[in-house]
Image (cartoon, rainbow, N blue to C red):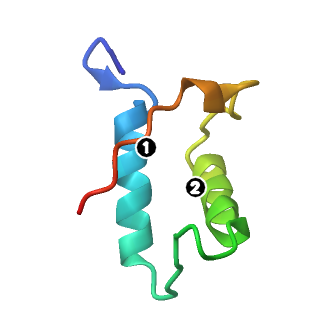
Amino acid sequence: MVEGSEMVGLSASEALFGFAAWLASRKEEVTFSGHNDAGEPARLVGRFCEANGLEEPRARWENQLVWPTEEE
């Protein structure tokens, strides 16, 4: 968001791109898939959100999601 000529906070897309860049720059690998425990990815999301001062998810936020179809 821009207030005057200063950037204020992160947009949702900026946060997603920033999270992906942070994961790609880490020395330790983490696996994200439906076949693995979701605890570690969720912990990393929490760390990223806290470091960037992002708000906690709202109640029933998952009802607003639209997941892209899987690529073949």
Q: Residue at x 61, y 40 (%)?
A: 53
Characterize the local packing of mark 1: few (<14), some (14-19) or many (20 or more) Cα atoms within 10 angstroms.
Answer: some
Q: Could you tell me residue 38's position as x and y percent?
A: 68, 66
Residue 10's quadrant in the figure?
A: top left
Which label is found at residue 40? none
Q: Could you tell me residue 59's position as x and y percent?
A: 76, 24
Q: Is residue 59 left or right of residue 10?
A: right
Q: Quadrant of the N terminus?
A: top left
Disc 2 residue type? Phe
Residue at the limit of the structure toward the top, as seen here: 4
Disc 1 residue type? Ala
Q: Residue at x 40, y 30 (%)?
A: 11
Q: Could you tell me residue 34's position as x and y percent?
A: 57, 67
Q: Does the CB distance between marks 1 and 2 fall below 8 Å?
A: yes
Residue under pointer 1: 15
| Nearest to N terminus: mark 1 or mark 2 | 1
Residue at the limit of the structure toward the front, as seen here: 72
62 lies above or below 26: above
Q: Nearer the viewer, residue 59 or 17?
A: 59
Residue under pointer 2: 48
42 lies above or below 63: below
Residue 15's quadrant in the figure?
A: top left
Q: Secondary structure at mark 1?
A: helix
Numbered label tally: 2
Q: Is residue 9 left or right of residue 50?
A: left
Q: Could you tell me residue 49's position as x and y percent?
A: 60, 47
Q: Secondary structure at mark 2?
A: helix
Q: Quadrant of the C terminus?
A: bottom left
